[in-house]
Image (tube, grey):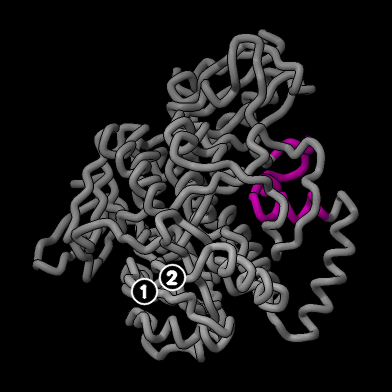
């Protein structure tokens, strides 16, 4: 019996499997493709995802291969000065290709003992009170206690479960690819700048050695989005919109994407769960898709591990849907708005001008940046301190940094009083007595995902809060 089968070996799947493995859970990743994709759909990590990597001790790997950019301009391309003192130790966007992110996460997963099988396609599943049976394309059957579909927007797992995927079909489509160009760089940049005055969906950015990443609106929506466009398709659209095809040739890869927006009705059906694009799809405007998916995995991993290991309190696994479904709904609304704001039509352009004026107010600018970067996410833990339900940013302690203490994925009581105790929960929660000038409360209890589960200094109150997230005490 495998503990958890993860269907899909992209960033969501390997991130989830790594989180499970931290807690000793046997996670098997099944990936239908023989090799990792070469298509680069996402180009960076927002602040919350950067924090996630830092919390697990992976950030240095990413910083070595990425480039830091200001957070300004990521809401509909409206450039405003970044607000002072964003609530994060990482106030930047880390430019890094999705293919690199996937490689780094896969390397980490392999290092800590996650089993990944390629050329293994899941085609059927059934479940009972004790586990899930997964059927592979070659006829093999595997048995697991739980199964998580991280298998993308066309999720086989979601389809087999019969989970509704309501939303809107694509109305607009773009062509995307990496191609070599013959046009001189300065001339090309001038053309792009002129087109983007009215069409923010257009772009051509240099990757080096004469190769450019090009995105341009398609002429209608393809009936079968799985069929990649041809070079002629791309060049024809470039000429129609930019007046030139840049002398594009020798494509590395070509793809297409649309503005379809859909959200799964539920993230859990018995012993089967959904994460990442299997649970939600939306256009890439704002760069939130990969980030949303990684953060799904980060939320789910420790909860599912607790269930497998037998200490999960009632309702913990269901809180994955309760917490993450509204976050995805908000991201979908944001991307819908961003697509409209990027339209070349007169009405959306007027709204865009109005929004630009509003973003001169720092509170508006801050709110939109926190929305895009996900550092503003607050889960509903009920009434209490303003920190409750929020993730705590990395803070300096007298003896190091907060996030350095979270690499093992356990709960953490940061106690500035030295008077509290986690006796009975020490197998699940670390007790750290230290002080920080950046924390103005006596103590905080953090879940493994860094969200604040309790604030205070009263031992009895702490004892009433620990079971909600960490189960019963052990004598």
Question: In the image, residue 16 lies at what x, y percent?
Answer: 39, 46
Determine if residue 452 is in view.
no
- Mark 1 lies on residue: 249
- Tell me where the magenta segment starts and ends, as one range: 365-388
- Residue 432 versus residue 90: which sits nearer the camera? 90
Say above or below: 5 vs 127: above
The disc, 2 or 1, on the residue closer to the chain's N-terminal end is 2
Question: In the image, residue 388 lies at what x, y percent?
Answer: 71, 38
Q: Is residue 434 magenta?
A: no
- Residue 256 versus residue 314: which sits nearer the camera? 256
Residue 182, which numbered label? 2
Task: Answer with the quarter of the image where residue 419 lies.
Answer: top right
Name the residue rendered at 23%, 62% in the picture.
Answer: 33
Question: In the image, residue 229 lies at what x, y percent?
Answer: 37, 81
Task: Answer with the quarter of the image where residue 142 lies.
Answer: bottom left
Question: In the image, residue 12 lies at what x, y percent?
Answer: 40, 53
Name the residue rendered at 59%, 20% in the picture.
Answer: 401
Dominant SS in magenta: loop
Disc 2 and disc 1: Cα gap in Å? Answer: 8 Å
Q: Nearer the viewer, mark 2 or mark 1?
A: 2
């Amino acid at each position: 019996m495998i503990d958890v089968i993860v269907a899909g070996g992209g960033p969501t799947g390997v991130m989830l499997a790594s989180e499970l493995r931290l807690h000793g859970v046997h996670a098997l990743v099944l990936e239908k493709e023989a090799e990792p994709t070469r298509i680069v759909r996402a180009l960076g990590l927002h602040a919350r995802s950067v924090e996630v990597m830092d919390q697990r001790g992976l950030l240095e790997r990413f910083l070595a291969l990425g480039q830091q950019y200001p957070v300004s301009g990521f809401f509909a391309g409206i450039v405003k000065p970044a607000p002072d003192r964003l609530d994060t130790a990482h106030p930047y966007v880390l430019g890094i290709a999705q293919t690199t992110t996937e490689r780094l996460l896969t390397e980490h997963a392999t290092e800590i003992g996650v089993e990944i099988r390629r050329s293994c396609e899941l085609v059927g599943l059934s479940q009972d009170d004790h586990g899930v049976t997964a059927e592979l394309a070659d006829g093999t059957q595997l048995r697991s206690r739980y199964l998580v579909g991280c298998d993308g927007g066309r999720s086989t797992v979601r389809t087999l479960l019969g989970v509704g995927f309501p939303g809107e079909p694509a109305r607009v489509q773009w062509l995307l690819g990496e191609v070599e160009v013959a046009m001189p760089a300065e001339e090309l940049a001038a053309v792009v700048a002129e087109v983007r005055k009215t069409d923010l969906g257009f772009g051509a950015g240099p990757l080096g050695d004469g190769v450019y990443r090009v995105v341009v609106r398609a002429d209608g929506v393809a009936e079968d989005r799985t069929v990649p466009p041809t070079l002629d398709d791309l060049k024809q659209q470039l000429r129609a919109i930019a007046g030139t095809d840049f002398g594009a040739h020798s494509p590395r890869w070509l793809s297409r994407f649309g503005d379809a927006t859909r959200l799964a009705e539920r993230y859990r059906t018995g012993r089967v769960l959904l994460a990442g694009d299997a649970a939600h799809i939306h256009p890439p405007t704002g760069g939130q898709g990969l980030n949303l998916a990684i953060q799904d995995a980060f939320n789910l991993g420790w909860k599912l591990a607790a269930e497998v290991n037998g200490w999960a309190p009632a309702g913990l696994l269901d809180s994955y849907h309760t917490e993450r479904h509204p976050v995805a709904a908000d991201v979908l609304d944001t991307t819908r708005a961003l697509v409209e704001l990027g339209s070349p039509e007169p009405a959306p352009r007027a709204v865009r001008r109005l929004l630009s004026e509003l973003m001169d107010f720092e509170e508006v600018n801050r709110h939109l940046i926190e929305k895009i970067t996900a550092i503003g996410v607050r889960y509903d833990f009920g009434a209490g301190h303003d920190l409750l339900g929020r993730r705590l940013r990395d803070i300096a302690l007298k003896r190091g940094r907060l996030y350095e203490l979270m690499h093992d994925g356990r709960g953490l009581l940061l106690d500035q009083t030295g008077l509290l105790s986690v006796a009975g929960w020490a197998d699940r929660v670390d007790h750290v007595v230290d002080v920080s000038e950046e924390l103005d409360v006596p103590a905080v209890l953090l879940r493994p995902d860094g969200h604040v589960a309790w604030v205070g200094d009263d031992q009895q109150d702490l004892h009433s809060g620990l079971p909600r997230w960490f189960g019963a005490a052990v004598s």
